[in-house]
Amino acid sequence: MNKEKQANDFSDIVFGRKSIRSYDEDVKITHEEMLEMIQKATTAPSSVNMQPWRFVIVESPEEKEKLRPLIRFNTTQNDTSSAMMLIFGDMECYEYGEEIYNQAVSENKMSAEVRDQQLEAIIPYYKNLSQQEMNDVVKIDSSLFAMQFMHVARTHGYDTCPIGGFEADQLADAFGLDKERYVPVLILSIGKSKDEGYQSVRLNAEKLTTFK
């Protein structure tokens, strides 16, 4: 873990987050720490716990160069970050359903009877969803992971920037994934911030909320 800053104050982690576009190019994140952060972030909720999020970590100069023309005006993040996390939603995530639910049984978090009942209902349901319905499910769930990961990264002393401006139709192909199965959701840059980021404003909750 990055020893320079280890934060565990909720307010600092959540309300101090900013989208950082420029990073210290000398800071690298080990695979061990990256996997640790990903593992922590996968505690995010997902529909029936199917965990449809999948990741490609782009960190080498060669792979970043491949990514560069696909991210439009977000090249500073790509050029300076420790890594770019490509988050995809797996349209066939239900293939892991049995493995996930078996693990729940082995860890005494679910009975075998409940596992069988759940899988009997869930797997056919997921298989029968339309492409658009499945697309919506995996994108919502993967976005929950993304937000969780941005908070986890801050506890490790890193900052991030969520990037939605990229060539979605080319991303999976560029990194060797089946574009019919893996839907690009978001790209996150991560690294040690080199700038302070921008102050931003939010609309008042009263303007956005209706009570019935």
Image: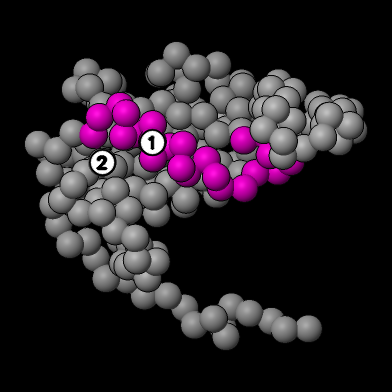
Above or below, comparing residue 108 to residue 2 in the picture: above
Q: Check residue 36 in the rendering and tell me which mark sits there, or answer none.
A: 1
> Looking at the image, which is closer to me, 148 or 137?
148
- Report if residue 31 lies within the magenta region: yes
Q: Secondary structure at mark 2?
A: loop
For the residue marked with disc 1, what is the amino acid? Glu
Q: Main secondary structure of the magenta part?
A: helix
Specify whether residue 86 is in view: yes
Residue 192 x %, y %: 19, 47
Q: Residue at x 70, y 43 (%)?
A: 47
Q: Which residue is mark 2?
A: 1
Residue 193 x %, y %: 18, 51
Decide: marks 1, 2 in contact (CB < 8 A)? yes
Q: Residue at x 41, y 18 (%)?
A: 175
Above or below, comparing residue 168 to residue 21 in the picture: above
**Residue located farthest toward the left when viewing the structure as drawn:** 26
**Residue 206 as seen in the image, left or right of residue 66:** right
